[in-house]
Image: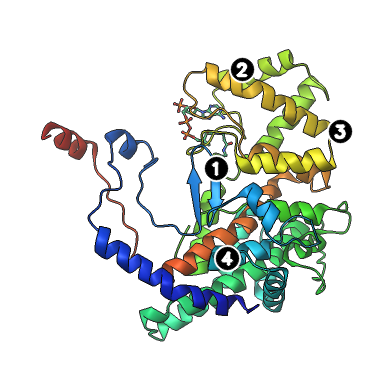
Amino acid sequence: TTDLKAAFMEAIPQEMERLKMLKKEHGAAVLGQVTVEQAVGGMRGIPALLWETSLLDAEEGIRFRGYSIPELQERLPGAKPGGEPLPEGMLWLLLTGQIPTAEQAHGVTGMLRERSAVPAHVQQVLAALPSGTHPMTQLCTAVLALQSGSKFAAAYDQGVHKSKYWEPVYEDSMDLIAKLPGIAAAIYRNTYKGGARIEPDPSLDWAANLAHQMGARLAPRSDELLCVKIASVGSALSDPYLSYAAGMAGLAGPLHGLANQETLRWVHGVQQELGESPTKEQLRDYVWATLKGGKVVPGFGHAVLRKTDPRYTCLRGFAQRHMPEYPLFRLVSILYEVVPDILMQTGKVKNPYPNVDAHSGVLLQYYGITEERFYTVLFGVSRALGVLSQGIWSRTLGLPIERPKSLTIDAMLQHVASN
Ligand code: AMX
């Protein structure tokens, strides 16, 4: 079949069976222990969530349905033969667990295209916001405005049986994914191009349509770049519009997705102070000055990963192929040689290596998307594939509401004393 929904439905019975078996046979097995340090340290590393679509390994980075990023670049169908993978293929893989054929990926393109129209009221809401509103705030606002059309919310109101939750959640998720390029482009055009909209081109795929609707003067290959960027997926849960908007509010924090924008500002600061080709010695001093100013070096470090982020490596490979002489890329490459040593010398940074945000902005600059406040929106559009796929599975498997237990300092002290 080239119909994603049909392929997804085929995958359901086996997955339900596996979850039932897991609960029945191993329900009492211990996955890990929780230390006081973890409870006061942001719950880091506590194995406490079922998540089928991806797995993050501290050493190796992320795998989607068991495949690493280089493996997916090799195996997922491209927009052109041998080109960068189509995000549509990634969506097929995340939902079904199977690598799609080119026809199946193109089937998803067609299905999304039919759902892609952005309602007029959402455009009006965006247009009504003050022009300086941060693009991430605009994204959350637009998605919440879309929620009025939620099929899940409507079905729930009508008293749908819980075994059928998955279906309206699937429909909402596809609607939302389909509309995100139009929404992101509207945010871009409103904020930076005086608001004039560009209509979608029905001959283009999902990511290419985003590039197209953002604006004419993007360099060739910017659509391929958006494919590479959009294929790097991620994490959240519940009514798809509300939960995605909540996730986006989290992504908008400077230690998370906003690091994208922060990195570029920081790198521009380097260029302004030290010129186009600073020496390593000058860069070392600059990095130390940032640290001594009580600030983080954006784009470096990770809460889970302990190696260079494979998404960074993937974007670096793209830059090496298409813009090896670009000054900003050369600067980012030298930083890769300089920053980790310094972060190690602080003695506290657990992962001194670059993450995806250290690189993505540089590529976008090269292709003419120079407005760094917009970058996290692109990050958010790409994340939709991952979080919404998992959201569909969570409702399909009937997973319960998440409710981690919190403790007071007194409760922790009492617990420690009584053990
Ligand atoms: N620059 C300076 N200090 C850093 C640092 C960096 N890049 N990375 C970590 N540190 C510091 C922490 O602030 C912390 O200091 P403290 O003890 O004085 O509070 C100490 O090193 C230990 O932190 P950690 O256990 O290594 O990292 P973490 O899990 O607490 O935080 C992260 C992870 C990503 C928030 C952090 O590395 C950071 O702030 N990096 C810069 C911002 C960034 O690039 N974020 C994007 C991450 C990728 C993403 O989600 N998009």
**Picture coordinates of residue 212, whole percent (x, y):** 82, 62
Residue denoted by label 3: 325
Whether ligand 1 has any atom under 8 Å from the Cβ at mark 3 is answered as no
Marks 1,4: beta carbons within 8 A: no
**Picture coordinates of residue 74, whole percent (x, y):** 70, 53
Instruction: Say which of 22 and 379 sits in front.
Output: 22
Instruction: Say which of 204 and 288 sits in front.
Output: 204
- Of tags 2 and 1, the one toward the viewer is 1
* Disc 1 residue type (three-letter): Gly
- Which of the marked residues, 3 or 4, is nearer the chain's N terminus? 4
Q: Gap between marks 2 and 4, in whole Å?
A: 47 Å
Q: Gap between marks 3 and 1, in whole Å?
A: 28 Å
- Which of the marked residues, 2 or 3, is nearer the chain's N terminus? 2
**Picture coordinates of residue 222, whole percent (x, y):** 81, 53
Find numbered disc 3 in the image and state the secondary structure of the residue it sits on.
loop
Residue denoted by label 2: 288
- Of tags 3 and 1, the one toward the viewer is 1
Q: Gap between marks 3 and 4, in whole Å?
A: 38 Å
Residue pictured at 64% horizontal, 67% vertical: 100
Residue denoted by label 4: 98
* Disc 2 residue type (three-letter): Trp
Instruction: Say the numbered circle drawn on residue 61.
Output: 1
* Disc 3 residue type (three-letter): Glu
Residue pictured at 72% horizontal, 39% vertical: 316
